[in-house]
């Protein structure tokens, strides 16, 4: 690396000096996988920047980020909170969380590791990202401890396993038995391309650890001399010369610095990647000019195809003695099915999540919920800048339930939860239903009103920098993840996914980093490589 720092620049910390071949902005699931894989080419200098904290070894990593049980971490040290409007024209009353730590949301989420369906990836419209093209990346990223067939990997950096049935909580055993009694097929592997039925949830943990991308990818790569990881470094702007990206402006240790690179790759997620593009002058021109931002390139599609999984929670009061034990594991069982009359298969997912106790005047209360989410929603949201200040959170409008088919399918999902809970398998577990009430279930109109008041999110945001053909006026990146209209800039994270897949998103986020690294490395000859990470190397 050569030092291109200008005399007028602030003093750059030693770890950030010089100009890099590749700067990856964002150390989440995609960014960790991408940066680590790119650094396997020893001739490429790679800098990974993360706004949250970086923990360089397992000893320094907080226990909350290592637990394998699959509980969502909400500690403000590790997550950022945003507010969004769940319904069209509504108030920004929905709180949603994003990981702000090395490993990103994959270091704090519920650890479900489901893949989408083959047609989800085929719908992206590029042979580079078809199911046949991405399956090798899915296999390459995992070490599945339960299956060794052609759908699964056995030497990847992410350990995947399912809780054995003798470790399921009674709630999850009851869900499994009730679903089978109602005619749903038993499914041992929810990650095969069929994925329909009820079965154990695949989870990314192994060897007693949550297998985040920080642990699986970055930790084994840290000793490479061409790989630098820097936490507590918040990128506020992409620097351009004309329409070529030449570096980033960032805040680190209380000062503003600039770091130069031959190529900048945004992996900051479906919220922060579009926000950074727009703050830097790439986006809807009229909106940017109205905020006093000079336009570098007009891309009207940025932020305009926001997709997510809307969810609803059917709440019950457990019988005395049926509360969750303090050492319980998270949702061990998933039911995946298709709404009646739906042309999109597997568009309803039902789990019983483990919820923390709520302190009430009479003591701790243990809420028990059936949670249903809608896969492949038709409704689209929008993200736009609130101001030109990078400290101001963007305006997010989810626009859930805008389309009638979304409302109809989610209504069916709620009623299915109620029917499952009414089966005899839950007689010793459930005392009564708390919400929705019978009056809320009496008609579609009443249930719609309940949904509007109780709609939630699975934090599966996608689509704000959608991949597409350069001839598509709403496309933001091409199928090499290059930002259209500029040079030296890519986006590699879930924001490029045109629509959210019918699954939890973490495994796809890692796959996007894996596959993009493969595509990027194919664009130039490599002089030498270092070994790829494997399960054996991690142990």
Image (cartoon, rainbow, N blue to C red):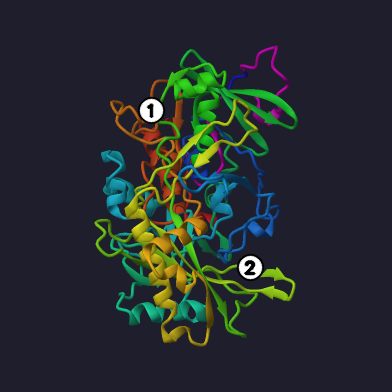
9 in the magenta segment:
yes
Q: Residue at x 71, y 28 (%)?
A: 13
**Which residue is painted at 34% across and 59% down in the image?**
408
Q: Position of residue 218 (x, y in %)?
A: 56, 46
Residue 288 falls inside the magenta stretch: no
Q: Does label 1 or label 2 sit earlier along the sequence?
A: 2
Q: Which residues are magenta?
A: 4-29
User: Comparing marks 1 and 2, which lies closer to the viewer?
Assistant: 2
Seen from the viewer's position, the closer of residues 371 and 419 is 419
Q: Position of residue 79 (x, y in %)?
A: 63, 49
Q: Is residue 516 left or right of residue 454?
A: left
Residue at the image position 38 percent from the left and 71 percent from the top: 416
**123 sits to left or right of 416:** left
- Residue 356, numbered label: 2
Q: Are marks 1 and 2 in contact (CB under 8 Å)?
A: no
Q: In which quadrant will I find the C terminus?
A: bottom right
| Quadrant in which the N terminus is drawn | top right
Q: Residues within 10 Å of mark 2 (few under 14, many from 20)?
A: some
In the rendered image of this protein, does residue 145 appear above or below residue 238?
Answer: below
Residue 64 lies, in percent from the top left, at 66, 59
- Give the number of marks: 2
Q: Classify mark 1: residues with Cα within 10 Å, few (<14), some (14-19) or many (20+).
A: few
Q: Which mark is residue 524?
A: 1
Residue 116 visible from this viewpoint: no
Q: In the image shown, does 92 or 225 lie closer to the viewer?
A: 92
């Amino acid at each position: 690396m050569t030092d291109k720092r200008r005399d007028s620049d602030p003093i750059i910390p030693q770890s950030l000096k010089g100009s890099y071949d590749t700067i990856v902005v964002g150390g989440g699931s995609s960014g960790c996988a991408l940066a680590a894989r790119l650094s396997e080419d020893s001739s490429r200098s790679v800098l990974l920047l993360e706004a949250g904290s970086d923990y360089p070894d397992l000893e320094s990593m907080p226990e909350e980020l290592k637990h394998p049980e699959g509980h969502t971490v909400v500690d403000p040290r590790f997550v950022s909170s945003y507010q969004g409007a769940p319904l069209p024209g509504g108030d920004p009353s929905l709180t949603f969380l994003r990981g702000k730590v090395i490993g990103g949301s994959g270091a704090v989420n519920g650890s479900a590791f489901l893949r989408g369906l083959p047609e989800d990836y085929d719908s992206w419209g590029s042979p580079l990202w078809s199911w046949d093209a991405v399956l090798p990346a899915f296999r390459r990223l995992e070490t599945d401890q339960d299956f060794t067939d052609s759908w699964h990997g056995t030497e990847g950096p992410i350990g995947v396993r399912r809780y054995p049935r003798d470790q399921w909580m009674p709630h999850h055993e009851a869900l499994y038995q009730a679903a089978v009694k109602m005619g749903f097929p038993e499914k041992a592997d929810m990650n095969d391309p069929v994925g329909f039925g009820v079965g154990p949830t695949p989870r990314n943990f192994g060897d007693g650890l949550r297998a985040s991308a920080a642990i699986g990818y970055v930790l084994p790569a840290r000793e490479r001399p061409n790989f630098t990881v820097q936490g507590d470094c918040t990128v506020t702007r992409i620097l351009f010369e004309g329409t070529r990206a030449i570096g980033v402006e960032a805040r680190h240790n209380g000062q503003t610095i600039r770091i130069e690179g031959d190529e900048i790759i945004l992996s900051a997620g479906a919220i922060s990647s579009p926000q950074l593009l727009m703050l830097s002058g790439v986006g809807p021109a009229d909106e940017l000019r109205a905020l006093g931002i000079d336009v570098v390139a007009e891309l009207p599609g940025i932020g305009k195809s926001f997709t997510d999984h809307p969810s609803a929670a059917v709440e019950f009061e457990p019988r005395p003695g049926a509360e969750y034990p303090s050492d319980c594991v998270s949702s061990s069982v998933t039911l995946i099915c298709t709404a009646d009359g739906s042309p999109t298969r597997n568009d309803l997912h039902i789990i019983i999540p483990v919820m923390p106790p709520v302190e009430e005047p009479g003591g701790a209360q243990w809420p028990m919920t059936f949670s249903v989410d809608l896969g492949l929603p038709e409704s689209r949201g929008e993200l736009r800048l609130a101001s030109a200040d990078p400290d101001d959170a963007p305006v997010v409008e989810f626009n859930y339930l805008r389309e009638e088919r979304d409302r109809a399918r989610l209504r069916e999902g709620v009623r299915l939860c109620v029917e499952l809970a009414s089966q005899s398998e839950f007689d010793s577990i459930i005392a009564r239903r708390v919400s929705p009430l019978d009056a809320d279930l009496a008609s579609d109109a009443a249930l719609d009103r309940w949904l509007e008041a109780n709609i939630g999110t699975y934090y599966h945001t996608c689509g704000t920098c959608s991949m597409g053909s350069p001839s598509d006026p709403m496309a933001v990146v091409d199928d090499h993840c290059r930002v259209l209209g500029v040079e030296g800039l890519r986006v590699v994270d879930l924001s490029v996914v045109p629509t959210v897949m019918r699954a939890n998103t973490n495994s796809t986020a890692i796959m996007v980093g894996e596959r993009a690294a493969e595509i990027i490395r194919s664009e130039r000859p490599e002089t030498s490589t270092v070994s790829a990470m494997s399960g054996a190397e991690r142990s």
